[in-house]
Amino acid sequence: MAFKHTNTRGTDYYLHSRKVTLRGSGKEQTIYFFAKKPGEGSLEAVPSEYMVVESKKTGLPVLKRK
């Protein structure tokens, strides 16, 4: 089951991750993002060094380092 966050407006978002290669350095990095539907790359829990916060302006959830 994918990690689900319901924002203050009542919309559900599911946490995903993806490995990307940075253009300038060629290093591989993991990015985290929220989507309205669970899909490929969905995570079951928030990584331990992060917490979920909500954008005051848009209501979108984002991960922030603790």
Image (tube, helix red, strand yellow):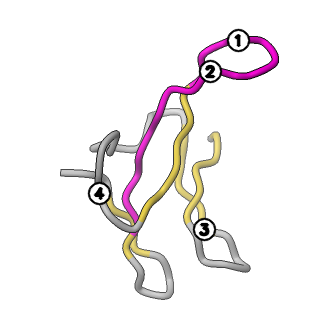
Which residue is under mark 4?
38
Query: Magenta segment: does it hold 15?
Result: yes
13 left or right, relative to 21:
left
Query: The magenta stretch spans which residues?
Result: 13-29
User: Which is more foreground, mark 3 or mark 2?
Assistant: 2
Please, what secondary structure does the residue beneath circle 4 have?
loop
Q: Around disc 2, counting alpha carbons within 10 Å, would you say few (fewer than 14), some (14 to 19), or many (20 or more)?
A: few
Which residue is under mark 2?
21
Q: Around disc 4, counting alpha carbons within 10 Å, would you say few (fewer than 14), some (14 to 19), or many (20 or more)?
A: some
The amino acid on which the numbered mark 3 sits, given as a three-letter code, is Glu
Which residue is under mark 3?
54
Q: In this view, does 24 lie above or below 56?
A: above
Query: Magenta segment: does it hold 14?
Result: yes
Q: Which disc is residue 26 wearing?
A: 1
Q: In which quarter of the image is the C terminus?
A: top right
The amino acid on which the numbered mark 2 sits, given as a three-letter code, is Thr
Q: Badges 3 and 2: C-beta atoms under 8 Å apart?
A: no
The amino acid on which the numbered mark 1 sits, given as a three-letter code, is Gly
State the residue at coordinates (47%, 76%): 7
